[in-house]
Image (tube, rainbow, N blue to C red):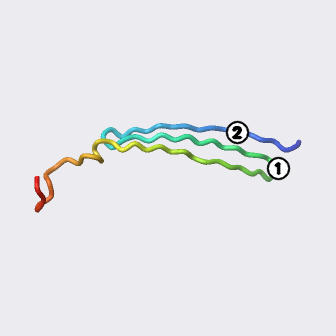
Amino acid sequence: MGPRASYSVSAGFMTAGRFGSASYLTPLASYQLTKRFSVFAGLTYMRIVPGMGLLHPRGPAPSGSAA
């Protein structure tokens, strides 16, 4: 059995209502050198979008500040 390469891709999405959302994409490549030894490499691209709950907090203005 000679060297063998394999590839995979994972993707996902998560939302948390007013807190925002996140998505990711993860490609992975592995290469089997021998029966017992293989190497792999991968990376993750993540995109995070903040929600309105983080941009405009609710509640009264802190004391001492102009409203």
User: Pointer 1: residues within 10 angstroms few (<14), some, or many (20+)?
Assistant: some
Residue at 71% x, 49% y is: 40
Q: Which residue is mark 1?
A: 33
Q: Which mark identifies residue 63?
A: none
> Whole-percent x and y of residue 46?
50, 45
Of helix, strand and loop, which one carries label 1?
loop
Q: Residue at x 47, y 43 (%)?
A: 47
Residue farthest to the front? Answer: 66
SS for tag 2? Answer: strand
41 sits left or right of 55 in the view: right
Q: Residue at x 40, y 40 (%)?
A: 21
Mark 2: give few (<14), some (14-19) or many (20+) Cα within 10 Å. few
Question: Foreground: 28 or 45?
Answer: 45
Q: Quadrant of the N terminus?
A: top right
What number is the disc on residue 7?
A: 2
Q: Is residue 46 left or right of residue 9?
A: left
